[in-house]
Image: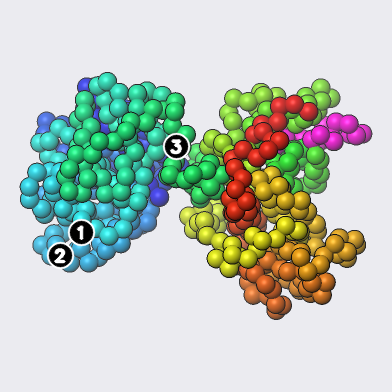
């Protein structure tokens, strides 16, 4: 996944493009580059590494009113300047930046036998395709696009042409306008608050941009009359703006959230070594949170126990300050809240601070009350979450606290986490599950250790938006009471991602089936027991499976809600931020 930003205006646009690229850096940071048009000629500056590395290479005297830029996460070809964008055509008269994948680039190369290629990328082929065609520059772009299979959001500049040309298919592309400047970007976050309105390009739409005008065409080069989107009225700000509910959109955004989180902690190094050294000195960690944040705290504590060998405790915030608490200065109190404004959690943090102990908060909102109270802040990067039932904020919390535990432990697992962030995707639920399982109204969720936590979160999601009176229970506790409730009308959702506990879970499944219960199994490996329904999970390292499995339970809850005709974004009796006790 890469980010593109292109800008044209009355004055020097290099700074504007660099600023835009920085907001897109979560989309890729292996390398970056810009192409400038100066006196009709194209010049390119590239660098491996973060945007700041590119800035160091840009001479202060560089000045251009037309700039296209790119920040890259390598897909085709290794990380090096040759593979960095922008790419030039063979005659150096066309420059392009690209987000997406050209699936047939090898075949297209064969149609350009006389062209020498300097990179291993698919994008360089696109640049040369454009250069090989005749006609006006927009005609050349359209002709090349029609030969391409795959996805693309591109910004293109031509020698001796004071315009920027854009094209889009499958990959997101937005064009923002304000007086004297037009900017195109992969994400409207690049526009900040400086633009009056923007357009979202649809598939196979093209744009010709000057500093004062945006002309949008379809693939037949007919002008398209598009509606302007005003920033204060735009409800969606990512790749999934056509989804009918925020919860669905936010579930689909989770791969982006994981990539952004990985980048922030391993490239920007949000936690510096001095802070880590201070935190490592604590012998004990006590997590305090409510609801979904409480479930993420359970996993955060589990990660710290496993990897950093720390003594950990977890409390529900609404109970914490009313029971007897031996507040210790040797303990770091960790408060988890998506908004940072949860009343019970804030009250607990204030109590701990008054007794002289230190605090760390895990929040998604930079300027919140908890952050102001805390000695240390562990930010999450889920972006704005609108749906009341938390999805991407929960995943961001879990992934952030896993990274935190690994950093505290000193274990170097950066490559494993990067691989996960790159490979993670949202898979649709199997049709047989949707066709049958949605008919149940008596549902239990079971699992062991981390899978039990996932079961708790899965059950909460179903309660929140489908109003089904379901419960989650540790699988080993079934025979201590809950098994009495299982009958022929019961669906039991079993989460099983621990191979060392596989036989234990299989025994639990047999106990359930013997009482007539039906099984929906979520697992990444084969089980030697019959089940009615199954969701096969992708296989990642064990510590990452709570993320893989919970996303399927989020989708399951959403499917139940939609099947019943409920609004998943605004469930009854609930609010996004609980600011009262």
In this view, the residue farthest toward the front is 565
Residue wearing tag 2:
111
The mark lying in front, picked from 3 and 2, is 3
Inter-mark Cα distance, 1 to 3: 30 Å
In this view, 529 is above or below 233: below
Q: Is residue 313 magenta?
A: no
Disc 1 crowd, CA 10 A, few/some/many (<14, 14-19, 20+): few
**Picture coordinates of residue 12, whole percent (x, y):** 25, 25
* Label 1, label 2: how far apart the Cα atoms are: 11 Å
The residue mark sitting in front, 1 or 2, is: 1
Which residue lies under the disc numbered 1?
A: 147
Residue 478, picture quadrant: bottom right
**What x and y, as percent, mark residue 173?**
33, 42
Q: Residue at point 67% right, 72% down?
A: 532
Residue 351 is left or right of residue 179, and the answer is: right
Which of the two labelled residues, at mark 3 and mark 2, occupies the earlier sequence position?
2
Q: Is residue 97 above or below residue 480?
A: above
Q: Earlier in the sequence, mark 1 or mark 3?
A: 1
- The kind of secondary structure element at disc 1 is helix
**Image: 115 above or below 263:** below
The boundaries of the magenta stretch are: 317-336
Do labels 1 and 2 touch, CB within 8 Å? Answer: yes
Identify the residue shown where x is 67% and y is 48%. Answer: 466
Q: Residues within 10 Å of mark 2 (few under 14, many from 20)?
A: few
Q: Are the two marked residues, 1 and 3, in contact with CB atoms closer than 8 angstroms?
A: no
Asked whether the viewer can see residue 376, the reply is no
Q: Please tell me the numbered disc located at residue 237.
A: 3
Q: Indicate which disc, 1 or 2, sits on the residue closer to the N terminus.
A: 2
* Location of residue 75 in the rendering, given as x and y in whole percent from the top left corner: 37, 56
């Amino acid at each position: 996944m890469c980010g593109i930003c292109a800008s044209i205006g009355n004055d020097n646009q290099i700074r504007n493009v660099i600023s835009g690229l920085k907001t897109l850096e979560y989309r890729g940071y292996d390398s970056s580059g810009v192409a400038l048009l100066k006196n009709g000629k194209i010049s390119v500056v590239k660098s491996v590494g973060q945007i700041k590395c590119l800035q160091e290479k840009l001479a202060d005297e560089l000045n251009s009113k037309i700039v296209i830029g790119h920040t890259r996460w390598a897909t085709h070809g290794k990380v090096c300047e040759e593979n960095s964008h922008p790419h030039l055509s063979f005659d150096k008269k066309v420059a392009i930046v690209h987000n997406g994948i050209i699936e047939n680039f090898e075949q297209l190369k064969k149609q350009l036998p006389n062209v020498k290629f300097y990179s291993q990328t698919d994008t360089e082929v696109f640049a040369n395709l454009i250069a090989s065609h005749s006609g006006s520059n927009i005609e050349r772009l359209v002709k090349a696009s029609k030969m391409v299979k795959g996805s693309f959001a591109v910004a293109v500049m031509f020698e001796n042409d004071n315009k920027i040309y854009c094209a889009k298919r499958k990959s997101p592309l937005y064009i923002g306008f304000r007086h004297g400047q037009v900017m195109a970007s992969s994400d409207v976050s690049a526009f900040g608050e400086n633009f009056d309105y923007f357009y979202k390009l649809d598939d196979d739409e093209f744009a010709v941009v000057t500093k004062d005008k945006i002309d949008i065409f379809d693939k037949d080069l007919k002008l398209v009359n598009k509606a302007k989107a005003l920033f204060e009225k735009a409800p969606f700000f990512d790749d999934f703006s056509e989804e009918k509910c925020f919860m669905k959109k936010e579930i689909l955004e989770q791969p982006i959230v994981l990539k952004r989180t990985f980048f922030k902690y391993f490239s920007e190094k949000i936690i510096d070594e001095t802070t880590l050294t201070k935190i490592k000195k604590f012998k004990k960690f006590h997590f305090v949170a409510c609801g979904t944040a409480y479930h993420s705290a359970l996993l955060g504590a589990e990660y710290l126990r496993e990897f950093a060998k720390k003594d950990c405790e977890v409390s529900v915030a609404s109970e914490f300050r009313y029971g007897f608490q031996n507040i210790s200065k040797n303990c770091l109190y960790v408060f988890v809240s998506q908004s940072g404004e949860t009343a019970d959690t804030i009250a607990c943090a204030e109590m701990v601070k008054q007794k002289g102990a230190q605090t760390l908060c895990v929040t998604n909102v930079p300027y919140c009350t908890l952050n102001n109270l805390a000695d240390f802040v562990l930010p999450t990067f889920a972006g704005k979450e609108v749906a009341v039932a938390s999805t991407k904020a929960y995943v961001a919390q879990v992934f952030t606290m896993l990274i935190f535990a690994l950093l505290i432990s000193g274990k170097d697992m950066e490559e494993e986490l990067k691989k996960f962030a790159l490979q993670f995707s949202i898979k649709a639920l199997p049709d047989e599950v949707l066709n049958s399982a949605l008919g149940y109204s008596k549902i239990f969720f079971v699992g062991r250790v981390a899978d039990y936590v996932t079961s708790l979160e899965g059950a909460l999601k179903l309660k929140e938006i489908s109003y089904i009176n379901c419960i989650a229970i540790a699988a080993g506790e079934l025979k201590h009471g809950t098994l009495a409730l299982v009958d022929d009308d019961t669906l039991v959702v079993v989460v099983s991602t621990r191979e060392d506990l596989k036989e234990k879970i299989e025994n639990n499944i047999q106990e359930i089936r013997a009482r007539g219960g039906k099984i929906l199994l979520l697992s990444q490996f084969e089980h030697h027991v019959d089940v009615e329904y199954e969701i096969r999970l992708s296989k990642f390292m064990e510590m990452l499976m709570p993320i893989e499995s919970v996303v399927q339970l989020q989708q399951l809850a959403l499917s139940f809600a939609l099947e019943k005709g409920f609004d998943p974004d605004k469930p009854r009796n609930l609010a996004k931020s609980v600011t009262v006790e």
